[in-house]
């Protein structure tokens, strides 16, 4: 009889878990995970499956990307690492233990293009890895397309890098992942005016860096985009 409360707890735990994990994988979605002060994005592409951009720094990306099952079944086929700062890639070792067949993509450069089912990815930066650069400025920057839907994924790239990377981008973007958690050194009003994003996502948690910068928030608001912050809004899932 002493086991009954424990069994009730286990059942309730998995009922709650089933309400917070990501949707089933037959349709497109783009999810910015609420993992604290770090980045982790899950994309599901019909015809390919689910893949991830960055892992965050701990177990939370695993948990939030898990299948709706009481068993730990991995749904991910591929993970892109924008750069190897701990808040973007610290959870990779755990992810590899959990998703043993997952592939890692960490050596792309501008001009590379990938077709993953109905999702297309165009690499805009870096031109090539350069040991003289700050690691943030070698971040993988990608334009994601799904039909007419377009999203820009920026890692932690700096303002000068992004302005160069976006030179051929025409604007009217659906989603812009604000670089480096909203740091003032990674977004300019010129970038926002050029891209004209409808939705701006800031992946951020409690921090001592002043992220997101009040200046960046002002740029986003003046540019007319709808701002979502994972620290305030939780995991943001777009369909």
Image: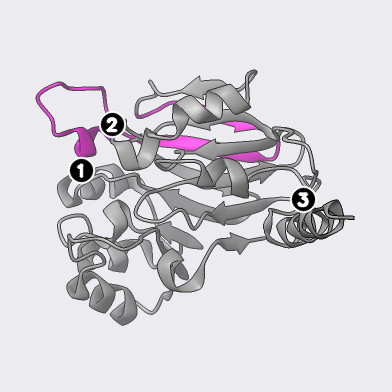
Q: Nearer the viewer, residue 161 or 25?
A: 25
Q: Nearer the viewer, residue 196 or 183?
A: 183
Distance between the Cα atoms at labels 1 and 3?
A: 33 Å
Say which residue label 2 marks: 126
Badge 2 vs badge 1, beta-carbon distance below 8 Å: yes
Quadrant for residue 62, please give it.
top right
Distance between the Cα atoms at labels 2 and 3?
A: 30 Å
Q: Residue, x 40% and y 24% (percent of image)?
A: 106
**Range shown magenta:** 110-139
Q: Is residue 71 above or below residue 230?
A: above
Q: Which mark is residue 161?
A: 1
For the N terminus, the quadrant is bottom right
Q: How is the image coloured?
A: one colour
Distance between the Cα atoms at labels 2 and 1?
A: 8 Å
Q: Is residue 109 above or below residue 152?
A: above
Q: Position of residue 183 (x, y in %)?
A: 21, 59
Residue 119 is inside the magenta segment: yes
For the C terminus, the quadrant is bottom right
> Circle 1: is it few (<14), some (14-19), or many (20+) Cα within 10 Å?
some
In what element is the residue under mark 1? Answer: helix
């Amino acid at each position: 009889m002493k086991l009954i409360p424990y069994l009730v707890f286990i059942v309730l735990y998995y009922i709650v878990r089933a309400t917070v994990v990501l949707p089933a994988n037959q349709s497109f979605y783009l999810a910015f995970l609420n993992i604290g002060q770090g980045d982790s994005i899950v994309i599901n592409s019909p015809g390919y499956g689910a893949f991830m951009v960055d892992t965050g720094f701990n177990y939370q990306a695993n948990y939030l990307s898990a299948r709706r099952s009481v068993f730990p079944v991995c749904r991910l086929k591929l993970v892109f690492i924008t750069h190897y700062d701990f808040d973007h890639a610290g959870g990779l070792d755990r992810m590899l233990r959990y998703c043993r067949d997952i592939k890692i993509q960490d050596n792309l450069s501008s001009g590379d293009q990938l077709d993953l089912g109905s999702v297309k990815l165009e690499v805009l930066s870096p031109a090539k890895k350069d040991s003289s650069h700050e690691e943030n400025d070698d971040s993988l920057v990608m334009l994601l397309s799904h039909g007419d839907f377009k999203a820009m994924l920026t890692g932690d790239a700096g303002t000068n890098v992004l302005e160069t990377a976006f030179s051929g981008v025409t604007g009217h973007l659906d989603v812009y992942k604000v670089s480096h958690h909203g740091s003032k050194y990674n977004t300019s009003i010129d970038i926002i005016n050029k891209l004209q994003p409808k939705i701006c996502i800031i992946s951020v948690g409690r921090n001592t860096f002043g992220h997101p910068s009040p200046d960046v928030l002002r740029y986003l608001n003046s540019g007319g985009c709808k701002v979502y912050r994972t620290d305030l809004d939780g995991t943001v899932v777009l369909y």
